[in-house]
Image (tube, rainbow, N blue to C red):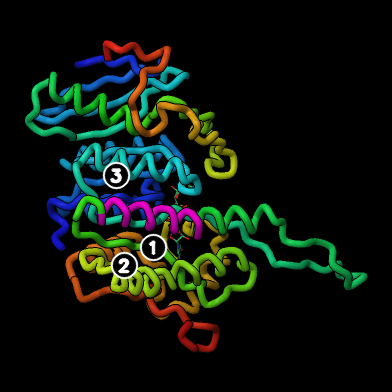
Amino acid sequence: MEIKGSVALVTGGGNGIGEAVVKYLSSRGAKVAVVDMVQKNIDRVVAEVKAAGGEAVGIQANVTSEADTARYIKGTIEAFGQLNIAVSCAGIIRDGTMLSLDKETGKVSKKLDFAKWQAVIDTNLSGTFLTMRDAAEAMVNGGWEGLLVPISSVNKVGQVGQINYSSAKVADALMPKIIVGEFLMRGIRKIRCVAIAPGYTATPMLTGMNQDALKAILEDVHLGRLVAPEEIASLIGYIVENQALNATTIEITGGLCYPKGIAK
Amino acid sequence: MKKILYNDMQFSVEPSGDRWDITYTLPNNATAVVAAGLFAGLPESEAGARALALIKTIFPVGIKSVGPDVLHPNTIGDLKIVGPDVTHPNFIYWDKDSVSCPKAL
Ligand SMILES: NC(=O)c1ccc[n+]([C@@H]2O[C@H](COP(=O)([O-])OP(=O)(O)OC[C@H]3O[C@@H](n4cnc5c(N)ncnc54)[C@H](O)[C@@H]3O)[C@@H](O)[C@H]2O)c1
């Protein structure tokens, strides 16, 4: 599939990786829908796309809402006449260990809030499911060629302090196998699904963190720096154009290793 | 520039070269973007009609966004978006005018 002339929808397109994907696809001739919860970020990204000569529609929405999902899929098609690429970048973290102990008594002093579990599962898993499901529905019914891109994470392997996040991301990473298998079963041949599992990426969330913690993270990255959001965006661009990539999850981490050099 | 008052919201459809930008006015009088660089080469009347169709889809009658306080430094945690009223007869599929949206539109 060619990027030029295609229509892409990017959730979480107002910041970080999603913003980079919006700008990359737009700079190569795609028309783009920027879906995000934060209007001021939508305004900024759409204005920058416009300044670079691109075409964009911004839709403020919450990816965890089924009604909102229907609204931004329909809005994209209303604006651009079709939908070919859906990238699900909207995501959050709410870290914490499942149990914390009181140092003196050794008894449980705190449990991970259920609200923290639910918020991450809702956004990172259910939100991704809704976008993939409804984008695929529109692509099938419209007869358009398509690509679905759930965003997983290298922490799908199981990161301590992230039982909610890792659980959602391992499920996101499985989606391409299931979705493409079902497409084959149902005779849906024109739509592919490839997930991306980024490693530590230089989005505002990470670059703004404690610099010592960041240094410690980078010691385990073979590349010696954070992955740039633009590098993830260009990988997605490559996937759009390479039809043989399908039903898989691609890691892009710069060579993230466990301490002592075992690749994660 | 074409002004559209729809569902008590003020939208503008403005030319930008041979394309069209759509913006709307927030309750605090700030301007938010709906779309930029759309409908290349269309005359104002057609661009206005396409813009209205797009606005009706993105902002179906019955939807209500409370906040977000976009100036708050902590944007995610403090956001509050009340989901659309999915039981509203005009939600998503526009087949009936609301009280605040005259038929003339
Ligand atoms: N940054 C990293 O190191 C990293 C690593 C691996 C995976 N990821 C994944 O990549 C994706 C993007 O991460 P990022 O670092 O760019 O994050 P980010 O915080 O910079 O951007 C996420 C965007 O999603 C939006 N968003 C959040 N919840 C939403 C909701 N319910 N509805 C609509 N929009 C919503 C936010 O407003 C924000 O603009 C996430 O899924 C994240 O888990 C990031």
Q: Which residues are magenta?
A: A125-140
**How far apart are labels 3 and 1 at the CA level?**
16 Å
| Crowd around label 1: few <14 · some 14–19 · many ≥20 (10 Å) | many
Q: Are marks 1 and 2 in contact (CB under 8 Å)?
A: yes
Q: Which residue is mark 1?
A: A150
**Residue visible at 33% across and 25% down in the picture:** B95
Q: In which chain is the residue bearing label 1?
A: A
**x then y, percent, for residue A107:** 88, 70
In the displayed structure, A97 sits above or below B97; it is: below
Which is nearer the eye, A80 or A152? Answer: A80
Q: Position of residue B23 (x, y in %)?
A: 30, 25
Q: Amino acid at mark 3?
A: Ala
| Residue at disc 2, secondary structure | strand
Of A147 and A34, which appears nearest the observer?
Answer: A147
Residue type for callout 1: Pro
Quadrant of res A80: top left
**Residue wearing tag 2:** A193
Q: Secondary structure at mark 1?
A: strand
Quadrant holding ligand 1? bottom left
The amino acid sitting under disc 2 is Cys
Going from N to C along the chain, the mark reached first, 3 or 1, is: 3
